[in-house]
Image (cartoon, helix red, strand yellow):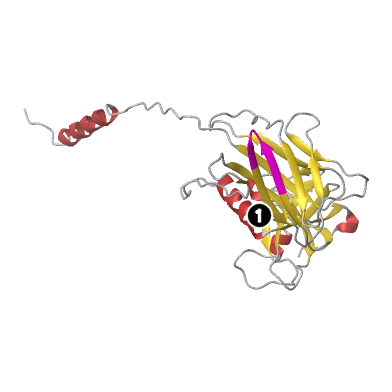
Amino acid sequence: MKRLPFLYPLAFYLLALCSLSGCETVIDAKLTTGPTQLSVDAVLTDLPGPQTIRLTQTAAYFNSSTPPAALSATVTVLDDAGKTFAFTDPDNDGYYVWQPRSATDTLGHIGRTYQLRINFQGETYNATSRMNRVPTVDSLVFSKVKINPLSKTEGYRAQFYAQDIAGATDYYRIRYFRNGVLANRARDIITSQDGSFRGNANTDGLIFIAPIRRSINPDSLYAFDDVVKVEVQSLTLEAFNFWEELQTQLSNGGLFATPPANVPTNIVNANASGRTAVGFFMTSAVRSRTARVATENLRPDL
């Protein structure tokens, strides 16, 4: 009986498939939990009203629950004008609050330098930040456009106008709110150098470029009668680097993902051999503008 030649490669592939399936091994990775660290979320501004610093403790990598609060800490902020601001935790929940003496009292002032000091579980942590200048937001307008060129669905695209302050390199973060809700996806971490992107041509003293002006839009655009608020916050170079690296890590994925890296921190333990901390302390001057998507605020698409 003559053997069919195509059976030989078929038998080879079946044998190879069986061999591969037999090599399947289940690996049970046991990740040890290291020591907890103090985590600091501190952004102080020049706006009137209370200022808040949140302290938590880090948790295990696969623990998706809310991080435990860092309680019973002593938190103070000192400025280079000799003032001391005490932060207390009235609700015992890790939110340490400074209360102003009047409705117009402000903690932050442009040009001053602030030092954060935290005493927690026998460790002393320090961080320093300068409150830099920030331009005003001159206007906030809207244009009616298609959500994409192939769609018949239309929405309203927001655009704000601000002019970089001439004479030095300035760093900013832009935030936006839709009907009082902050946009807080990774792509909504919007940073700018002199009203442009890092590494672009010299834009010192110029109007913010169009991609920055239009960066304050959700994917679905806005609807008529929405209320939109845009904020421009001043940053130090260190805080600018922090936000850029945080965005990179939050959006890191896919085929061309880079290896994960620690986001920088400026929280330093006074004891070099003591426990380290994570998070960041920054001070920002803030300027904002709010507008409704209404007929009087509509402009031709630019």
Q: Is residue 122 magenta?
A: yes
Residue occupying image coordinates x 71% and y 47% = 116
Q: Relative to residue 301, is residue 56 depicted above or below?
A: above
| Residue 10 visible, this orientation | yes
Q: Which of 193 and 278 is in front in this view?
A: 278
Residue occupying image coordinates x 79% and y 36% = 88
Query: x%, y% of residue 56?
Result: 66, 35
Q: Nearer the viewer, residue 106 or 75?
A: 75
Label 1: element kind: helix
Q: Is residue 127 left or right of residue 15?
A: right
Query: x%, y% of residue 82?
Result: 81, 54
Q: Nearer the viewer, residue 135 or 209?
A: 135
Q: Residues within 10 Å of mark 1 (few under 14, many from 20)?
A: many
Q: Which residue lies furthest to the left in this view?
A: 1
Q: Is residue 117 magenta?
A: yes
Q: What stretch is highlighted in magenta?
A: 116-124
Q: Which of 258 and 90 is in front in this view?
A: 90
- Number of labelled discs? 1
Image quadrant holding the C terminus, namely bottom right
Image quadrant holding the N terminus, namely top left
Query: x%, y% of residue 64?
Result: 59, 29
Query: x%, y% of residue 241?
Result: 61, 56
Label the magenta part by its dominant secondary structure. strand
Residue 101 lies in what quarter of the image?
Answer: top right
Q: Relative to residue 277, is residue 201 depicted above or below?
A: below
Residue 162 lies in what quarter of the image?
Answer: bottom right
Q: What residue type is labelled 1?
A: Ala
| Residue 216 visible, this orientation | no
Reading the image, the residue beneath label 1 is: 239
Q: In this view, does 278 lie to the left or right of 229?
A: left
